[in-house]
Image (tube, rainbow, N blue to C red):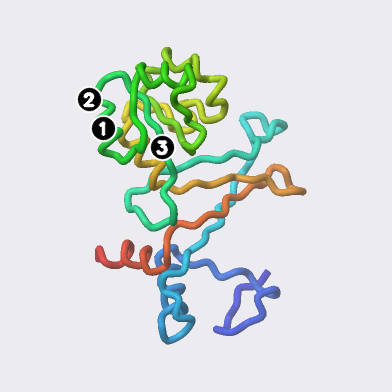
Amino acid sequence: MRDPVDDVFVCKYYKWVVYPFQEAVKAHRETHNPEMYNRPETDLHVTVELNMEGEKKTRLLDNFTRTVGIPHRFDQGEIPSVAAFAKTQEIQKLAIDAGAQLVGGVDMIKKIQVGELNLNDFKYIVAHPEILPEMVVLRGLLKKKFPNPKSGSLDVNLGTAVEKFLYGINYTASKDEYEKDYGSVQTVIGSVSYLFLLLYDRE
């Protein structure tokens, strides 16, 4: 397809115009300012295209959901609930300081086993690797929530793991219905005004 030569053109006949990320954010800020759409706090949605081929091209990746930590927090509405497990009080304190709503060690595992404590209301369960052998008895109860390194819920840096699940971006990678080797992620990465401040207030 041809490159557009004018400022105004029919999109379906020309290549999409590709902007650097900073310019794209700036353009959205201009269109959403009070003089135009008047929605400066609107969410900025992104689509990330993925190759869903595995190590062998004949084997494709399944859809997956992950959470990625971000250096600067933004309002995503309700903060999810996180329970954290660690053996030592020192590491437990790191989880408490990071914002985990429930923190404990071996004693907490025993309470869960006998039904004194229920983790169903917690969206995420994180743990320090040292306590993993004691947590194995909870695998059947926790199922997919059971901490594992692949999801980042089993981490030696427990405080960082707690913060990631409390304030990070949760996303799902999904395969295309017809082109199975093509996948995409659609998620929100912040408000237009928030991202503009991050990108331009540092210059």
Report helix, strand or loop for mark 3: strand
Report helix, strand or loop for mark 2: helix
Q: Give the farthest residue toward the right.
A: 178
Pointer 2 or 3: first along the chain: 3
Cα distance in 3D space between marks 2 and 3: 18 Å
Badge 3 crowding class, 10 Å Cα cut-off, few under 14, some 14 to 19, many 20 or more, is many
187 versus 128 height, above or below: below
Where residue 132 sits in the image (x, y, percent)? 42, 17
Residue at screen point 22% across, 25% down: 90
| Kind of residue at badge 2 | Glu
The tag on residue 53 is none
Residue at screen point 41% across, 49% down: 79
Q: Quadrant of the C terminus?
A: bottom left
Where residue 48 sits in the image (x, y, percent)? 55, 53
Q: Are marks 2 and 1 in contact (CB under 8 Å)?
A: yes
188 versus 192 height, above or below: above
Q: Give the farthest residue toward the bottom.
A: 35
Observer able to see residue 23: no
Cα distance in 3D space between marks 2 and 1: 7 Å
The tag on residue 82 is 3
Residue at screen point 70% across, 75% down: 13
The tag on residue 90 is 2
